[in-house]
Amino acid sequence: MTRKGTLYAIGVGPGDPELISLKAVRILKQVAVVYAASSTKNTYSLAEKIVSPYLKEGVRVVRLNFPMTRDKKKLSQAWENNTRQIVNSLKDGNDAAFITLGDPMTYSTFGYIMRAIKQGYPEIAVSIIPGITSYQAGAAAAGRVLAEAEESFAVISGALGAKKLKEVIAHADSVVMLKVYRNFREILDTLSHLELGASSVLISQCGLEGEKISRDLQEHNGSIPPYLSLLLIKKRDR
Ligand SMILES: C[S@@+](CC[C@H](N)C(=O)[O-])C[C@H]1O[C@@H](n2cnc3c(N)ncnc32)[C@H](O)[C@@H]1O
């Protein structure tokens, strides 16, 4: 029986092509197929752009389609189809990579693929190569400490609004909020209500063309930031 290939999940970092690990680059130079996916917006083209200098000649780059829907049935169907496609390409012993913006274990479609492989194809070897997350790069760009000494910090999503922020800020010293663009108005209002606006920083397009670091959130009154935007929120601004 032919040995099946390994699937490597590779975090390519948040945008700056130099923020990728040596291990990721080594594996990218070896694999026969590279899968890129995104459930939201068009981030696969960005992940592809980041890895393009590191791919061996003739490598196949395949875009996996994930529908932009909350319909669980449609989503799980898409994950199953995409997983089957990946697994089929590993059958002849070739290795493949699944690339993801930032880190594969942080708000990435890879989580769904990994679960589908574990359930349906437990014989497939999966190896995960971490990436620098968007918020680590954002904290560095803004010169903001996420946590020190006895402090704690939480990472949340703004995809469903600001409710989570109100709950979490009661227990953490610092909060990182990803996916802020859709409910940005509501999130800004909540920050101002909690008197956290002045100690919050918005980072957009970190490491990419058009990078913007806003320390005065009022300047965004009425305008929505790009999809690649995150907030660093601190109870006390040191
Ligand atoms: C689906 S999540 C992907 C998170 C990614 N896996 C990570 O490790 O950071 C997409 C969200 O990540 C954040 N993000 C990713 N790249 C970014 C960048 N270059 N600049 C600012 N925010 C970014 C934004 O909040 C965006 O809405």
Image (tube, rainbow, N blue to C red):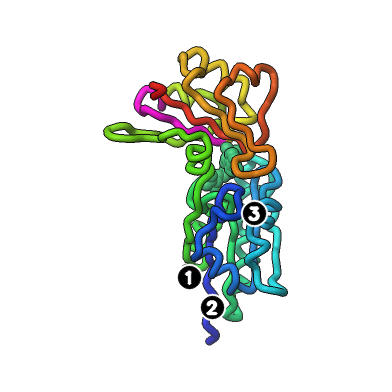
Of the two numbered discs 2 and 3 in the rendering, the one whose residue sits closer to the viewer:
3
Which x, y percent locates residue 153? 38, 34
- Between 5 and 23, the residue placed more toward the observer is 23
- Mark 2 residue type: Lys
Q: CA distance from mark 2 to mark 3?
A: 26 Å
- Mark 3 residue type: Ala
Magenta stretch: residue 45 in it? no
Q: Which residues are magenta?
A: 168-178
Give the labeled residue for mark 1: 125
Q: State yes or no: discs 2 and 1 in contact (Cβ < 8 Å).
A: yes
Give the mark nearer the N terminus: 3 vs 1.
3
Residue ID at (49%, 30%): 232
Q: State yes or no: discs 3 and 1 in contact (Cβ < 8 Å).
A: no
The answer to whether residue 107 shows anywhere in this view is no
Q: Quadrant of ligand 1?
A: top right
Residue ID at (57%, 20%): 216
> In the displayed structure, does residue 213 sit left or right of residue 223?
left
